[in-house]
Image: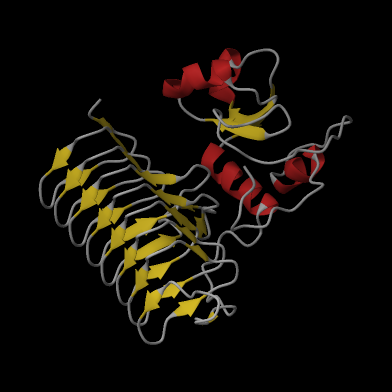
Amino acid sequence: MKNLFFKKKNNIKLNDILILLNLSKQKKNHIVNDIKELQTASNKDISFFNSIKYLDLLKKTKSKLIITDKKFQRIIPNKIKTILVSNVFLAVAKTTSLFYPSSVNDNLDFEVEHIQKKKYKNLKFGKNVLFGKNVIIGKNCTVGHNTIIENNVKIGDNCNIGSNVIIRNTIIGNDTTILDGSIIGKKGFGFYPDKKKNMRYPHIGLVIIGNRVEIGCNNTIDRGSLSNTIIGDGTFLDNQVHIAHNVKIGKNCIITAQVGFAGSASIGNKVLIGGQAGISGHLSVGD
């Protein structure tokens, strides 16, 4: 699927990546299409492997080019060419920035404008509402005061968006409610400490919110890094919930106030989580 929110740089070759990572160039210098996770990569994409717990995904991946640590070299299938590095995540961060130069910053969107009544005839909206280019919003929706919906965001039918909400890099289904003060689709808190400075990890993923979802006041939902942050159909979030990058929440869950989800946590269907609970990164709960 084409990335609607981040422009990809084309014609990047293998040696461009190797030079960036301070590695020796190769004689066979072919074009690399994109950088993706193991499960979504095609045979023209570069991917990465950094933990033995993803061995099943490694065996099934279509990628023929993988960034990894030397300690994993022996378990990489022979059909896959490896790029060996000392810090996999740092190398992936640099490579992602090469493909998506604008993905690190969450700069002000200067293209947003006051909403035009003629363009959105069936929309009820408050004062000082700003929309970016190519925003798609369905029938019977409302948008509150001082809300900003940025470029290419898609919102389904019968949705209610509160006041002082910011939505970017997001796709929302039907019959969904987002209450006041929520910020959805900003970059996640991904970085790697280098010797001289902390390096930001690019986030090129989306936030995907299903149908009949309710998001409480002052929620913050980060977009994914390489994959997407997903909230399933029928899930309700109370006020002041934080959802980090790549989190997957299933259908019909109930999550009460001040719960925090660390990156890449996975929550099943019909899970109930009490107030002020913390879910650590890469954990699976339910199902």
Instruction: Give x and y (percent) for residue 148.
Output: 43, 75
> Viewer-proximal residue, 129 or 35?
129
| Residue at image point 54% right, 22% down | 71
Q: Quadrant of residue 35?
A: top right
Camera sees residue 87: no
Q: As drawn, which residue projects farthest toward the right?
A: 27
> Viewer-proximal residue, 91 or 235?
235
Q: Quadrant of the C terminus?
A: top left
Instruction: Give x and y (percent) for residue 41.
Output: 62, 31
Instruction: Give x and y (percent) for residue 39.
Output: 54, 28
| Residue at image point 30% right, 63% down | 178
| Residue at image point 18% right, 36% down | 271
Q: As drawn, which residue projects farthest toward the bottom?
A: 127
* Image side of residue 138 versus residue 28, left or right: left
Instruction: Give x and y (percent) for residue 5.
Output: 59, 58
In the image, residue 229 sits, relative to residue 106, either above or below, namely above
In the image, residue 257 sits, relative to residue 56, either above or below, namely below
